[in-house]
Image (tube, helix red, strand yellow):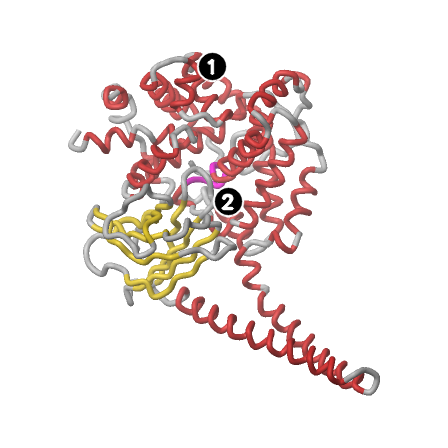
């Protein structure tokens, strides 16, 4: 009992795995969980127990066609896993370029039949779209290159009980820089922003503030990471737009940073 | 505090077993589900089909228990696999098994669905819905040959383990998991002290853990 508070929090592992903590308790427990591998393993095992609970109730088989419906829904283009969507990007670009060439070719064919002005307008808009998208692609390729550098590790910051929302933190240990990619983040009120914290030697170290796009996404690059000391976790709170030196609101997302 | 008091009687504190190493260092037989989810993350539909064959019935059971109606339970299963497919890249083996992850998603989606209805309406519907013994049997489900534990055996062990709990322990755990109630809400509902509910949940889950460890879904766990 060298650390009574820790003992108490450890006892919440079962209730956490069951989803039986209040939001405040869950946030407090997650902050503890981030720095306690033992509690993480305990939660993982209690989740195994929870996964079995339904077998103690009445049996009810789903319709025989449910399997096919599950697979059909997965085949919808919008349902692709992130990695697969990424892999398929190049062929899409190929198709877009081919489409543009085709459009130009068709354009010359139609010049004699239609007003050249309309075609030039269309071509101009398409070229503009292509330029904008190329710029975006170049920017994203630079991000991808940064993520795939040797020595870059990814960590997940999550909210309680549910996979949404989430933040992926890519940590480049050689350059002491990080990239944050957030998704499904709720908008913040006027004058407020999300703030990232590194938990170093058990204390929060303030980092960048950011606001998500209306889609809930955010990407922040070139984030300095504390170089010395034991950085055990990262967390996110909502703070004034200018940032805080100490957290002033409960932790919204948190995750351990176990460096290899 | 009640939790601190209860800690001193925690029977597992001095007998923690080697399972502690498993989630971070899966054994040679523990790769099945994790491999499947990795393949799914790369866009392999067959991997998701295999996960459905392994866990579709369990997720349906979780959902059915929460939503009380087959059509809604199936919708939850559809949503669960769609979400797992989209977010397979985010699965982290160190945080638990694939089965545990899928169950968490299914429970969350089922509770969302229930919350979308009024709680009162649901209680009425659950009481009047298909009676447990009139629900179709699960004969159509394949048993995963790699698991080493067949469905009937696992189910029987879960029922025995639940029967071994005191009725108040079982009720507290089931209210939390299937009704989505926090311990405070359970205490309020049952008009019992919060500390009592916390102790029931904790001791009940410890007991289930001891009984069910050989029957976890994850290979090698």
Q: Is residue A116 magenta?
A: no
Q: Which residues are magenta?
A: B96-100
Question: Compared with residue A25, is residue A215 higher up or lower down, i.e. above or below?
Answer: below
Residue B9 percent coordinates (x, y)? 25, 19
Q: In the shown orientation, is residue B127 left or right of residue A30? A: right
Question: Which quarter of the rendered picture does the N terminus of chain B lie within?
Answer: top left
Give the class, few, some or many, for how many residues have Cα within 10 Å of label 2's Cα (few <14, many ≥20).
some
- Picture quarter with the C terminus of chain B: top left
Q: Which mark is residue A245?
A: none
Helix, strand or loop under label 1: helix
Chain letter for the residue marked with disc 2 in the picture: B
**Mark closer to the chain start, 1 or 2:** 2
Query: Residue B191: x, y in percent?
Result: 40, 13
Q: Is residue B99 magenta?
A: yes
The residue lying at 38 percent from left, 22 percent from top is B201
Q: Nearer the viewer, mark 1 or mark 2?
A: 1
In percent of width and height, residue A12 lies at 33, 29
Secondary structure mostly seen in magenta is helix
**A125 is higher (above) or lower (below) than B109:** below
Pointer 2 residue = B32
Give the alpha-carbon distance from disc 1 to disc 2, as whole Å: 31 Å
Residue displayed at 43% across by 54% down: A182
Q: Nearer the viewer, residue A110 or B196?
A: A110
- Disc 1: which residue: B163
Nearer to the camera, B90 or B111: B111
């Amino acid at each position: 009992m060298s650390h009574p508070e820790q003992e108490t929090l450890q006892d919440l592992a079962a209730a956490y795995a069951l989803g039986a903590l209040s939001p405040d308790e869950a946030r407090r427990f997650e902050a503890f969980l981030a720095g306690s591998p033992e509690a993480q393993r305990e939660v993982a095992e209690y989740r195994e127990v929870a996964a079995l609970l339904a077998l103690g109730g009445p049996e009810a088989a789903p319709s025989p066609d449910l399997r096919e419906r599950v697979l059909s829904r997965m085949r919808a283009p919008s349902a692709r896993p992130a990695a697969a969507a990424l892999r398929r990007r190049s062929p899409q670009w190929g198709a877009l370029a081919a489409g543009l060439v085709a459009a130009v070719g068709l354009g010359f064919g139609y010049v004699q039949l239609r007003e050249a002005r309309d075609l030039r307008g269309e071509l101009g808009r398409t070229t503009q779209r292509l330029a904008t998208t190329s710029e975006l692609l170049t920017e994203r390729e630079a991000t991808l290159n940064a993520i795939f550098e040797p020595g870059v590790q990814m960590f997940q910051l999550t909210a309680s009980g549910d996979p949404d929302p989430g933040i992926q933190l890519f940590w480049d240990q050689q350059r002491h820089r990080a990239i944050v990619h957030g998704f499904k983040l709720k908008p913040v009120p006027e004058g407020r922003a999300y703030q990232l914290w590194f938990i170093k030697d058990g204390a929060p170290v303030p980092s960048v503030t950011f606001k998500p796009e209306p889609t809930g996404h955010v990407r922040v690059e070139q984030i300095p990471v504390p170089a010395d000391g034991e950085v055990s976790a990262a967390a996110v709170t909502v703070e004034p737009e200018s940032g805080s030196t100490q957290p002033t609101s409960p932790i919204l997302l948190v995750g351990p940073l176990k460096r290899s | 505090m009640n939790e601190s008091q209860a800690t001193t009687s925690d029977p597992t504190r001095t007998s923690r077993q080697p399972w502690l190493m498993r989630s971070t260092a899966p054994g040679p037989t523990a790769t099945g589900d994790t491999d499947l989810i990795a393949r799914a993350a790369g866009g392999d539909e067959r991997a998701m089909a295999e996960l459905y064959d392994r866990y579709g019935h369990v997720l349906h059971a979780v959902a059915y228990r929460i939503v009380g109606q087959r059509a809604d339970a199936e919708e939850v299963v559809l949503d669960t696999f769609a979400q797992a497919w989209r977010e397979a890249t985010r699965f982290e083996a160190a945080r638990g098994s694939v089965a545990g992850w899928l169950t968490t998603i299914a429970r969350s989606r089922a509770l969302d669905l229930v919350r979308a209805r009024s709680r009162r309406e649901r209680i009425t519907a659950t009481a009047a819905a298909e009676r447990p013994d009139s629900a179709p049997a699960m004969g159509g489900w394949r048993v995963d040959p790699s698991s080493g534990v067949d469905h009937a055996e696992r189910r029987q062990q879960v029922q025995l383990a639940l029967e071994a709990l005191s009725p108040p322990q079982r009720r507290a755990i089931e209210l939390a998991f299937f009704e989505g109630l926090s311990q405070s809400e359970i205490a309020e509902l049952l008009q019992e002290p919060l500390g009592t509910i916390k102790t029931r949940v904790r001791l009940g889950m410890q007991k289930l853990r001891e009984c069910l460890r050989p029957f976890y879904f994850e290979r090698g766990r």
